[in-house]
């Protein structure tokens, strides 16, 4: 009871913080999911997890979104993610959509700068066991990116984050890849992921 009272009294806004929203279970574990990924969302977090501890067949449909709304009404951000993944060893196919929007103040108090990037990823994952305790994997993917930025009239922050802000966007197609490694050491699991190897920009 005392702990609950203290947490309410010390409530603070979190800012300048990144957050991942793809996969409900992964979001609850933060970055630690890279070392234990064992369901179909492993194609995003660490594709090597499909072999070590994963099931032979797995399917995932998930949708998440989050917002950061600091006290300053002129600043905010939102992220959303949708994933559809189907895996059966040693292979997986996936589609996921990531979207991020930020609002920042401008010199004109009547306007805000809105920036949005939405990417659609279609990928194929290949997994290889090096030993019964070490696996590597890669996800090869095509990425379609839609980017928009510009000044928009100040208004309701939720509407600006959820809507397009009436900005034209530019689209680009890129090739990208993710690489994952996972190893078991007794009761310890360790994972390493290199995401977006080609570092595509839009």
Image (cartoon, grey):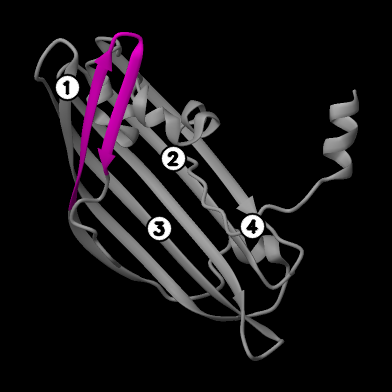
Task: Looking at this view, name the residue that lies furthest to the bottom.
Answer: 108
Q: Which residue is mark 3?
A: 118
Q: Nearer the viewer, residue 60 or 195?
A: 195
Disc 2 crowd rating (10 Å Cα; few below 14, some 14-19, many 20+) is some
User: Disc 3 on helix, strand or loop?
Assistant: strand
Q: Which residue is mark 1?
A: 135
Q: Nearer the viewer, residue 99 or 71?
A: 71
| Real-space Cα separation, disc 1 to disc 3, in angstroms | 31 Å
Please tell me which of labels 1 and 4 falls first in the chain: 4
| Real-space Cα separation, disc 2 to disc 1, in angstroms | 27 Å
Q: Please state if 95 lies on the left or on the right of 156 as rendered.
A: left
Please tell me which of labels 2 and 1 falls first in the chain: 2
* Numbered badge on residue 82: 2
Q: Quadrant of the N terminus?
A: top right
| Range of residues picked out in magenta | 176-194
Please tell me which of labels 3 and 2 falls first in the chain: 2
Please name which of the two marks, 1 or 3, marks the residue nearer to the observer: 1
Magenta stretch containing residue 192, yes or no? yes
| Real-space Cα separation, disc 1 to disc 4, in angstroms | 37 Å
| Predominant SS along the magenta part | strand
Q: Which residue is mark 4?
A: 15
């Amino acid at each position: 009871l005392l702990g609950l009272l203290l947490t309410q009294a010390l409530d603070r806004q979190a800012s300048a913080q990144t957050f991942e929203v793809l996969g409900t279970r992964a979001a609850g574990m933060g970055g630690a999911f890279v070392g234990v990924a064992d369901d179909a969302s492993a194609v995003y977090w660490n594709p090597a997890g499909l072999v070590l501890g994963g099931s032979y067949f797995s399917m995932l449909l998930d949708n998440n979104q989050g917002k950061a709304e600091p006290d300053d009404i002129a600043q905010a951000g939102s992220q959303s993610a949708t994933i559809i993944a189907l895996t059966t060893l040693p292979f997986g196919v996936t589609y996921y959509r990531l979207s991020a929007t930020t609002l920042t103040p401008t010199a004109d108090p009547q306007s805000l700068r809105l920036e949005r990037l939405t990417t659609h990823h279609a990928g194929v994952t290949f997994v290889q066991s090096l030993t019964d305790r070490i696996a590597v994997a890669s996800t090869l993917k095509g990425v379609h990116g839609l980017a928009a930025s510009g000044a928009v009239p100040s208004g309701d922050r939720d509407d600006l984050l959820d809507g397009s802000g009436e900005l034209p966007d530019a689209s680009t197609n890129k090739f990208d890849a993710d690489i994952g490694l996972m190893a078991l050491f007794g009761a310890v699991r360790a994972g390493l992921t290199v995401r977006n190897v080609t570092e595509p920009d839009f």
